[in-house]
Image: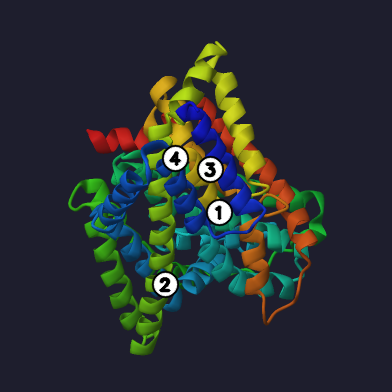
Amino acid sequence: MPPHIVGLIWFVATFFFIIFLRMPLGPALGLCGFFGLAQLLGLSNAASMVGYIAWDAVVNYLFSAVPLFLLMGTLATVGGLSSDAFWGIRKWVGRLPGGLAITTVGACGAFAAVSGHSLANAASMGTIAFGEMRKHGYDRKLAAGSICAGGTLGGMIPPSIPLLIIALLTEQPVGIILIAGFLPGILEMLVYSTIIILLVKLKPGYGPPSEGSTWREKWAGLWKLWPVVTLFLSVMGGIYAGVFTPTEGAAIGAFVAAVLGFIKKTLTWRKILEALDSAAISTGSLLFVLLGSLIFNAFLAHSQLPMWFSHTIAAMQSPAWVIVLLIVLLYLFLGATMSTMAMILLTVPITYGIMVTDLGFNGIWYAIIIERLVEIAAITPPIGMICFAFQAALADQEKIPIGEVFKGIIPFLIGDIVCLIILLVFPGFVLLLPNLMAR
């Protein structure tokens, strides 16, 4: 049997295990990769290779940034930085049409700069913003949609855990990829805010403006943002300036988050232990998934399946934009059936080869496009993991059916498509900060 056929069989089998058998992502990737290697190389060689991959993954210096960024985000959450971001921004934009929803998007963007994770972003902001919007008469669909859409900013604005994983899988510079997500994240915030204003202009009852704030209250609100700004500049400012590496920046960020929590008197030793426990569990789960992915990627390399895909697409002699459009549609389709991390780990080894190696697109631009696609998928029905995470976070608040959440997200999905088109058509916008960083 040709190697690429073996690769295709086990690639399809992985989808079957994950989607239909509901097998956890790490074991599904690892087992399919191991059995595929055993079929191609023999059982003994496959076992030796898996052992080497496991050791190399554990001792990878770059991967140590993942638990440190997770710890930083957890400390920021228990330290109340998400609440500070919401109340600080509210004083400035609350009077606008749909002001509280715009505040939510802005707070999601601010908290994304210290959390690095979409699910945590949506869940944390959901507990704060949803009840406040409902208390001021906001429509449930608008409130839910703005929170879930704003939650996706956690995967784009640095420090982003998904972008970090993409950088590790494609062996690209972590710091440059993280910096590249900043301007696209700001673009998303502006598009989401514009959508909110248009919705409220069309239907004023959707989001009545809240009470105004005096200049004294506005400056006091701005003061609430100093911990978020300090933490973000401590990490990304140092990485952008080349003062330290992303891993060192993650360690500094975790330390600064703890110090800020003590200064604000919102962090106790008990909360620190809870944060350490949460970060350790998340790291263990993520490492297990990454290990399975690396085993599966090694199998794909030996099966030459990515190369076969590339040659097949090249033989089509289609324009580059047609191939990119097909890849975009593929991710949107997968988003209806798979989780964000599953899409990244399964598809990046193949789509990176097609878009960067064969078509010659910039690898940094590729990482941002893929991240944007998987975040769109994360709020797309019927899976929409961020939507379900938001709904679960409302344990002690007003319940909202998942159908209403999905209805509320539709206008923001249209905005996401607009953002995606801009990023596809104007790659220079994505590469502006990385190019400045390289000088």
Q: Quadrant of residue 278?
A: bottom left
Identify which residue is drawn at 25% across, 50% down: 239
Labels 2 & 4 near each other (Cβ < 8 A)? no
Amino acid tagged 2: Ile
Q: Quick check: marks 4 and 1 in contact, CB under 8 Å?
A: no
Decide: few, some or many residues near mark 2? Use Cα within 10 Å; few <14, some 14-19, many ≥20: few
Mark 4: secondary structure = helix
The three-letter amino acid code for the residue at tag 3 is Arg
Label 4: which residue? 39
- Mark 1, residue position: 152
Pair 3/2: label in front: 2
Camera-side mark, 2 or 1? 2
Which tag, 3 or 1, sits closer to the chain's start?
1
**Residue under circle 2?**
281
Kindly report the distance in space between the C-alpha atoms of the residues bearing marks 3 and 2. 26 Å
Residue 261 left/right relative to 331: left
Q: Judge the density around disc 4: few (<14), some (14-19), many (≥20) Cα neighbours within 10 Å.
A: some
Note whether residue 180 is visible: no
* Distance from the alpha carbon under mark 4 to that under mark 1: 40 Å
Characterize the local packing of mark 1: few (<14), some (14-19) or many (20 or more) Cα atoms within 10 angstroms. many
Q: Quadrant of the C terminus?
A: top left
Secondary structure beneath label 2? helix
How far is disc 2 from disc 4 in space, using C-alphas?
33 Å
Residue 317 in percent (x, y) is at 55, 10
Q: Which residue is disc 3 drawn over?
A: 372
Which marked residue is nearer to the observer: mark 4 or mark 1? 4
Residue at 52 percent of width and 58 percent of height: 118
Q: Position of residue 434 (x, y in %)?
A: 32, 37
Kindly state the secondary structure of the residue where label 3 is placed: helix
Q: CA distance from mark 3 to mark 1?
A: 9 Å
Point out the tag, 4 or 3, that comes first from the N-terminus.
4
